[in-house]
Structures are given as structure tokens and as C-alpha cells.
């Protein structure tokens, strides 16, 4: 069982409201996501940590830091593996600035963290291109989310999405086909003919590009190679 620790380092959220959301995330993982993926995703135990408790995070835990603003322009949330340390960030201030639910973004990152923690899994499409093994990108828009205990959590794709088989292809039954089919506002990272990662996206119902699609970037192509920060420096992204 992998320990995932959600650290509230955002002044926009109280520890109380973040801590109250953790059981809803655990329900989503245990009741919806892991049964759907039938042992192909990491089993996790989620817990909460206030910012002043950061020094007590177990060294083998996967922390998710709720920060204020991104250190990489155009990202609202991501997870990474730097020098063997797996971690994630969700940028609460940036989510709120563009009118997105930070809880959906956090749910999105939790599910993608446990499906592909070191960002290496891909699926080869029938045309020979590869698609990133992302749990939520294709159905990531807030209007695709669903409720658990009064909190919105992210919709997610099912294993059938990375196949040529029949649906349903996502938890809420919104997709009309397998990868690289998208719902409105969704996106997917795929390789082009030269093998470079590019992003395909679907406009929202109002004709505008999906906000997370517009801001997400190509993490597999542009991942930072800088060394992992020491624990006290994790709190640098709060201004």
C-alpha cells in the first residue's frame, strides 16, 4: 500500500477544508477507480498534512503539494519523478484564477499519479502512434466531474479506452469511442509522425478551448531535469 500525502501549502485553502476532502478522494480511489482498473493501478492510502508538518512526511511517501502558483507557466497541476522521487503539485491560485475547481484538479492528479507514477506508460494506437497513459485528460473538464459526499471529483477513463474494443470508455459513459476520442474540453498527449509529443484537444460546449487543455503543456517532452528540492524548499511556491 503506497502512502500519498496531500500537503496544504496554499493560503487560499484552510487545513479543515482540505482535510475534509481527503475521505472523498479515498472513496473515489477505492470504490470507483481501483475496481475499474482491476489491479493495474497502485493501491494507495491518502492522508493529510499541514504545511508545518512537512518535515515528518515519510521518505517513501508520494506527496501532493497544494501550492499557489505554478513554477512552470501554463500548468495547473502535474506529477513527476525526479531522481527517483515521485511527487505532485496542484496550483490552487491558478485554478481559481481561470474558474476551475481545485478539487477536480486534485482528484485528477491523484488518479493519474497512481495509474502512471513515473510517467512512462504508453499505449500504441492502431496507426502506430503512442498515447500517454493518462487517467483523466480525455474527460478532464469540470462539467464531466461527478459528486462524492458533496465534493466534485474528476471523471476518468477505463482500461477499454486504451484498446480497440467496445465501450464504455470512461467512468461516466461520456466518451463515444476509444483513444484518442475526447469529450468536450478534454485533451490527450500523443506522438506525431516524428515521435514528438503533441497535444490534441476538443473545444468545450461553448466553443472555447478546454482550460486545462489550454494550460497543461507537454509534460513528457518538457519535464524538468533539475534535482529534486530538499523538503524545506517544497513550500517555495506559495506566493
Image (cartoon, grey):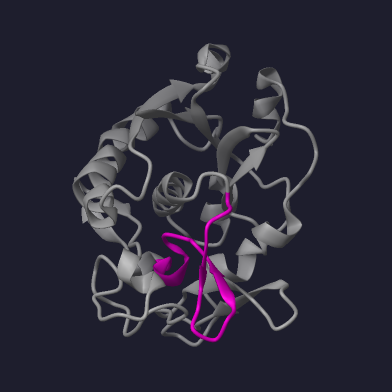
At horizontal 44% and vertical 47% (from top left) the residue drawn is: 106
Q: Quadrant of residue 69?
A: top right
Q: Is residue 132 magenta?
A: yes
At horizontal 58% and vertical 51% (from top left) the residue drawn is: 119
Q: Is residue 158 visible?
A: no
- Left/right of residue 234 with respect to residue 112 in the rendered view: right
Q: Which residues are magenta?
A: 119-141
- Left/right of residue 90 with respect to residue 172 in the rendered view: right
At horizontal 43% and vertical 77% (from top left) the residue drawn is: 179
At horizontal 27% and vertical 48% (from top left) the residue drawn is: 34
Front residue (pair 205, 97):
205
Residue 204 image offset from top left, x and y in percent? 46, 81
Residue 223 image offset from top left, x and y in percent? 72, 52
Q: Is residue 137 magenta?
A: yes
Q: Quadrant of residue 182?
A: bottom left
Q: Name the residue at the top extreme.
A: 56
Residue 142 image offset from top left, x and y in percent? 39, 65
**Location of residue 216 with respect to 114 vertically, above or below:** below
Magenta: main secondary structure: loop
Front residue (pair 114, 144):
114
Q: Name the residue at the right extreme.
A: 226
Quick one: quadrant of the C terminus? top right
Quick one: quadrant of the N terminus? top left
Q: Is residue 197 visible?
A: yes
**Location of residue 148 with respect to 212 vertically, above or below:** above
**Location of residue 111 with respect to 239 vertically, above or below:** below
Amino acid at each position: 500500500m503506497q502512502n500519498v500525502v496531500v500537503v496544504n501549502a496554499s493560503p487560499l485553502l484552510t487545513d479543515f477544508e482540505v482535510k475534509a476532502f481527503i475521505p472523498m478522494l479515498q472513496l473515489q480511489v477505492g470504490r470507483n477507480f481501483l475496481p475499474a482498473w482491476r489491479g493495474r493501478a497502485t493501491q494507495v492510502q491518502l492522508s493529510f498534512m499541514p504545511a508545518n508538518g512537512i518535515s515528518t512526511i515519510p521518505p517513501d511517501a508520494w506527496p501532493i503539494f497544494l501550492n499557489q502558483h505554478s513554477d512552470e507557466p501554463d500548468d495547473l497541476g502535474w506529477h513527476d519523478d525526479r531522481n527517483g522521487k515521485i511527487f505532485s503539485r496542484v496550483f490552487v491560485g491558478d485554478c481559481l484564477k481561470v474558474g476551475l475547481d481545485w478539487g477536480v484538479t486534485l482528484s485528477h492528479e491523484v488518479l493519474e499519479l497512481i495509474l502512471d507514477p513515473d510517467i512512462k506508460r504508453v499505449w500504441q494506437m492502431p496507426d502506430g502512434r503512442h498515447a500517454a497513459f493518462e487517467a483523466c485528460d480525455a474527460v478532464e473538464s469540470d462539467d464531466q466531474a461527478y459528486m462524492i459526499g458533496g465534493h466534485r471529483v474528476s471523471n476518468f477513463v477505463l482500461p477499454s479506452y486504451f484498446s480497440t474494443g467496445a465501450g464504455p470508455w470512461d467512468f461516466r459513459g461520456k466518451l463515444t469511442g476509444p483513444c484518442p476520442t475526447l469529450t468536450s474540453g478534454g485533451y490527450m498527449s500523443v506522438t506525431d509522425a516524428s515521435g514528438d509529443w503533441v497535444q490534441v484537444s476538443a473545444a468545450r460546449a461553448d466553443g472555447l478551448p478546454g482550460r486545462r487543455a489550454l494550460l497543461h503543456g507537454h509534460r513528457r517532452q518538457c519535464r524538468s531535469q533539475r534535482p529534486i528540492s530538499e523538503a524545506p524548499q517544497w513550500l517555495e511556491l506559495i506566493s
